[in-house]
């Protein structure tokens, strides 16, 4: 058994802090990465378990979880009532509604912004 695994098993016992202090820098880094991975794995498992319990509770009352949390969107309606008027040709995620300050990508286009207008 490697020293790191043995150290992991004895962490809950008395005197574990003195054992940790005896680990080398490399062993501490290894221990840290294994603990971080275990924490993330446990967090995801508990999150999934909680989501399942909440969905069961909502369903037993005749609701869906998104409905209770106000996450259900109405079909055909935009989120804020604005329409995209300008879109970057290379990155379609860059948009502007024509309200407020012009975004940097559109300011750099100069005065001719009509080439970015959405038809």
Image (spheres, rainbow, N blue to C red):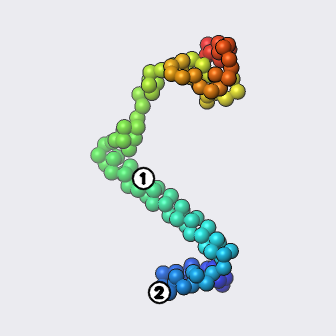
Q: Secondary structure at mark 1?
A: helix
Residue 94 lies, with reference to residue 85, above or below; the image says below
Q: Residue furthest right?
A: 90
* Residue at the image position 62 percent from the left and 27 percent from the top: 104
Image coordinates of residue 50 in percent, x first then y, are 41, 56
Secondary structure at badge 2 equals loop
Near-viewer residue (26 or 83): 26
Does the CB distance between marks 1 and 2 fall below 8 Å? no
> Comparing marks 1 and 2, which lies closer to the viewer?
2
Say which label, 1 or 2, has the lower sequence index. Answer: 2
50 shown above or below 1: above
Residue 76 seen in this snapshot: no
Using the image, determine if residue 103 lies above or below residue 33. Answer: above
- Residue at position x 67%, y 82% in the image: 2
Q: Quadrant of residue 103?
A: top right
Q: Within 10 angstroms of label 1, few (less than 14), some, or many (20 or more) residues?
A: few
Q: Which mark is residue 43?
A: none
Where is mark 1, residue-wise?
51
Residue 105 image offset from top left, x and y in percent: 65, 26
Which image quarter: residue 79? top left
State whether residue 64 is above or below residue 73: below
Cα–Cα gap, marks 1 and 2:
36 Å
Q: How many marks?
A: 2
Toward the viewer: 95 or 59?
A: 95
Q: Position of residue 16 (x, y in %)?
A: 52, 83
Query: Which quadrant of the rendered structure holds the C terminus?
Result: top right
| Disc 2: CA contacts within 10 A as few (<14), some (14-19) or many (>=20) | few
Q: Report the front residue among 68 and 38.
A: 38
Mark 2 = which residue? Answer: 14
In the image, what residue occupies the spot 65% across and 72% down? 30
């Amino acid at each position: 058994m490697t020293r790191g695994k043995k150290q992991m098993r004895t962490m809950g016992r008395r005197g574990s802090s003195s054992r940790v202090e005896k680990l080398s820098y490399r062993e501490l880094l290894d221990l840290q990465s294994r603990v971080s991975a275990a924490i993330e794995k446990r967090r995801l498992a508990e999150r999934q378990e909680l989501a399942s319990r909440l969905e069961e509770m909502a369903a037993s009352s005749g609701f869906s979880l998104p409905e209770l949390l106000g996450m259900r969107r109405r079909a055909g309606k935009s989120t804020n009532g604005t329409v995209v008027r300008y879109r970057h040709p290379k990155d379609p995620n860059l948009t502007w509604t024509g309200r407020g300050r012009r975004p940097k990508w559109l300011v750099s286009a100069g005065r001719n912004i009509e080439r970015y207008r959405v038809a």
